[in-house]
Image (cartoon, rainbow, N blue to C red):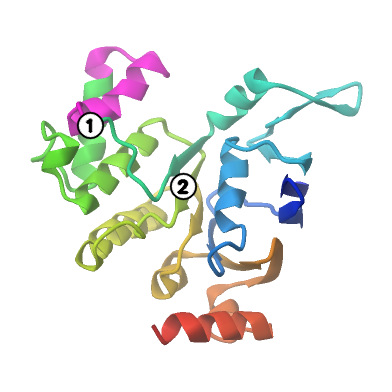
Amino acid sequence: MRDVTMRYGSRTVVDSLLLSVKPREKVAIIGPSGSGKTTILRLAMGLERPSEGWIRIDGNYLWHVERNGALLPAGEQQARRARRAVGMVFQQFNLFPHMTAMQNVTEPLVHVLRLSKKDAHDRAADLLTRVGLATHLDHRPAQLSGGQQQRVAIARSLALRPKVMLFDEVTSALDPELVGEVLNVIRDLAHTTSMAMMIVTHEITFASDIADRVIMFDHGHVVEEGTPDVVLRNPQSPRTKQFLKAILER
């Protein structure tokens, strides 16, 4: 992201953001509610078009095309092409309620990637097994716990084999006793896959464990960034210190 600004009317949510994520890098984004963290992910996914600036994913511009050395605005077709490299898991599970776990994962494989039904089934079964749901393939969302539903959502995003995965406070809608099972899945992915990840989270211990870099974001700006040892254990910014103190005292 280069000089990315996002405004809603007179309110600026993201202000002139400069952000790069390297291949394989795991980046945790922390900060108070309403600071603009989720908007960063929505911009990266192409769900929002920035008011200013440009975004490039795996070499492809999201909302621009390069012609004769100039960057020109582009439309939805260009955005669709670029966002194929990105997967996103939301706070809410967004599963199709009338479909089984298996069908929720195979549907985008058949209709987006045009895989055969057999190949889609095999890939979905492998991923659902990986997230611990091998015995729940034929269960519909109403038959699954919140943690299990979120794991189906993770498998669905992984199925498209993105270069970068975005996680938006994926445990915030879960009962406390279910948080650990979802964090363990993401922790395993962080430690065993080559995907880059951007993770918005309030789980400070989790961020410390899986992140290569932590970004503290507030009022549309990066307040502080660095390794977990610096930002989470020895923060330099008074705002970061204040935020961590409030989080850890909960």
Residue 240 rendering spot, x and y as whole percentages: 61, 80
Residue at image location 64% in from the left, 18% down from the top? 77
Span of residues in magenta: 98-119
Q: At label 1, which amino acid type do we have?
A: Pro
Residue 130 visible within the image:
yes
Report crowding for label 1: few under 14, some 14 to 19, many 20 or more residues within 10 A (C-alpha).
Answer: few
Between residues 24 and 155, which one lies in front from this camera angle?
155
Q: Is residue 104 magenta?
A: yes
**Left or right: 180 as drawn, with respect to 200:** left
Between residues 176 and 124, which one lies in front from this camera angle?
176
Residue 17 visible within the image:
no
Residue 194: which disc?
Answer: 2
Residue at image location 19% in from the left, 38% down from the top? 141
Q: Report which residue position mark 1 lands on.
A: 97
Answer above or below: position of 161 versus 26.
Answer: above
Between residues 75 and 65, which one lies in front from this camera angle?
75
Answer above or below: position of 178 versus 47.
Answer: below
Identify the image quadrant of residue 235.
Answer: bottom right
Q: Residue furthest left?
A: 135
Marks 2 and 1, Cα distance to the nearest angstrom?
A: 31 Å
**Left or right: 173 as drawn, with respect to 237:** left
| SS for callout 2 | loop
Residue at image location 68% in from the left, 32% down from the top? 62
Residue 170 rendering spot, x and y as whole percentages: 38, 54
Residue 78 rendering spot, x and y as whole percentages: 67, 22
Identify the image quadrant of residue 250.
Answer: bottom left
Q: At label 2, which amino acid type do we have?
A: Ser
Between marks 2 and 1 in the image, the one whose residue lies nearer the viewer: 1
| SS for callout 1 | loop
Q: Is residue 117 magenta?
A: yes
